[in-house]
Image: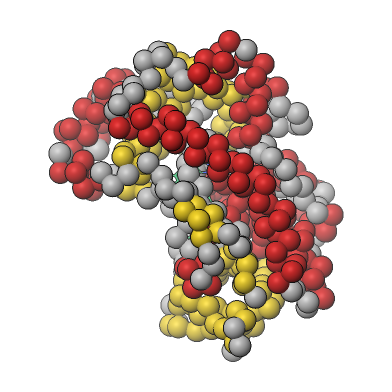
Amino acid sequence: MERTTVAVVGGGPAGMVLGLLLARAGVEVTVLEKHGDFLRDFRGDTVHASTLTLLDELGLGPSFAEVPHQLVERMQVLLDSGPQTVADLTRLPGAHKHIAFVPQWDFLDLLADAGKREKAFALRMNTEVTGVVRQHGKVTGVRYRDADGERELAADLVIAADGRGSRVRAEAGLPIRSFGAPMDVWWFRLPRHEGEPTGGLGRFGRGSGVVLLPRGDYFQVAYLIRKGSDAELRAEGVAAFRKRISDLVPWLAERLETVAELEDVKLLDVKLDRLRRWHDDGVLCVGDAAHAMSPIGGVGINLAVQDAVAAARILAAPLRRGAVTPAELAKVRRRRWFPTAVTQGIQRLVQDRFLRPTLAGAAGPAKAPAPIRLLQRVPLLQVVPAYLVAIGLLPEHAPAFARRAPERIERGD
Ligand SMILES: Cc1cc2nc3c(=O)[nH]c(=O)nc-3n(C[C@H](O)[C@H](O)[C@H](O)COP(=O)(O)OP(=O)(O)OC[C@H]3O[C@@H](n4cnc5c(N)ncnc54)[C@H](O)[C@@H]3O)c2cc1C
């Protein structure tokens, strides 16, 4: 049977950062990703200030600067009562007083390239994990399927970074706490013209919400629908769909014709949950696999990256010694529980107090909600949401073993 030290399941933000950091610590790591490339649509496009700082610490700042991206310094929501600035990032501490918007595949490609420079790093694309292997109750590897068929990979540790539908966490049977979510998302593209907004833009009105993410010559559009209403809305047809969106954002009306049929509109299932325990003997969950994040605030990528950094720092030495115990694995959750629980608490508050009534069409925000009014009256306070979104609680920094000078990366040593 093939063998590695750490099998990381999933090449999303959590899996790729963890793979890179462990490889830089000299731990043999194999990342298994079910897709053949990173060109998929169903992720966010944000690289947060704390991740930009991490990239600098890893020596990847100059490579990131070459990837086309847009920097956003303020976040706005558009309510019936008008535009409201809710976060001012220019007051943040540190070198990065912004969030970068970059198609996530470019960000993941950058991490994959950095990983490939490490001898201990292997990335297997088109490789879907189908289950875990157990011996005497302990997880000792994974079963996977690739072009050559079904095989097994033995590992000292399996790390589940396979997102909100994690197969590994389901197989590990870890206890889960689900918080529910009032919405799902319809996900589609619309043309974007020169000079149009470069930052994320949210528009919420009676009964619905639209978020526009600029990606070069098109907007990736997230249209919020009531959870479970997909079939009912699809039955109403494409004309009704176009009308609902143009009622909310009239300047999009003409280009909605480019959505020829509702098959062009994908349904994204939104979840908000958290494992009570993130590990079992031989297996650890991180990122959305440990705590599925709602899109609210666009913070899930940051939390996934921070989990990965914490896990690498805590586990690198025990992995090198070949002595990872359940007690070591438990430290990862202990370190990351506070930022995760507080952030999810805020997402629950926003979804229950604001989104649920908005989507029910019951309480159209003719007047902005009180916290948003407060942020307009005392703009200094806009640094608080800016910090929570762009940096997050307990930000993690690259451990010494993972730091590199950019010149060293350019030279390829
Ligand atoms: C509609 C929507 C919009 C969002 N927008 C934002 C945003 O703008 N900003 C933000 O910060 N967060 C956003 N989020 C949240 C964010 O997407 C997640 O929190 C984040 O992607 C979690 O990262 P991850 O690495 O843990 O998992 P993922 O990004 O989900 O990555 C998991 C990876 O595992 C792979 N995989 C899955 N199963 C297997 C398997 N069996 N074998 C091998 N590979 C497998 C997948 O292909 C994927 O590459 C959004 C969420 C949704 C639903």
Q: 274 above or below 356?
A: below
Q: Position of residue 341 (x, y in %)?
A: 60, 46
- Residue 202 appears in which quarter of the rendering? top left
* The C terminus, quarter of image: bottom right
State whether residue 1 is above or below residue 68.
below
In the image, 250 versus 381, the foreground residue is 381
Q: Position of residue 307 (x, y in %)?
A: 66, 53
Instruction: Give the residue displayed 36% in from the left and 15% down from the top.
Output: 366
- In the picture, measured across the screen, residue 84 lies left or right of residue 54, that is left
| Residue plotted at (24% across, 28% down) | 244
Which of 332 and 19 lies nearest the eye of the viewer? 332
In the rendering, at what x and y percent does residue 125 appear?
Answer: 51, 67
The residue shown at (78%, 78%) is 322
- Above or below, comparing residue 393 to residue 285 in the picture: above
Q: Is residue 354 left or right of residue 152?
A: left
Number of numbered discs visible in the structure rendering: 0
Tell me, yes or no, if residue 27 can be seen here.
Answer: no
Residue 35 makes an appearance in the image = yes
In the picture as drawn, the residue positioned furthest to the top comes out as 377
Q: Is residue 83 left or right of residue 160?
A: left
Q: Is residue 350 left or right of residue 63?
A: left
Residue at 44% x, 30% y is: 353
Relative height, residue 279 to residue 182 (above, below): below
**Please, which residue is most extreme toward the right here?**
400
| Percent coordinates x, y for residue 7 in the rendering | 62, 72
Closer-to-camera residue (219/181): 181
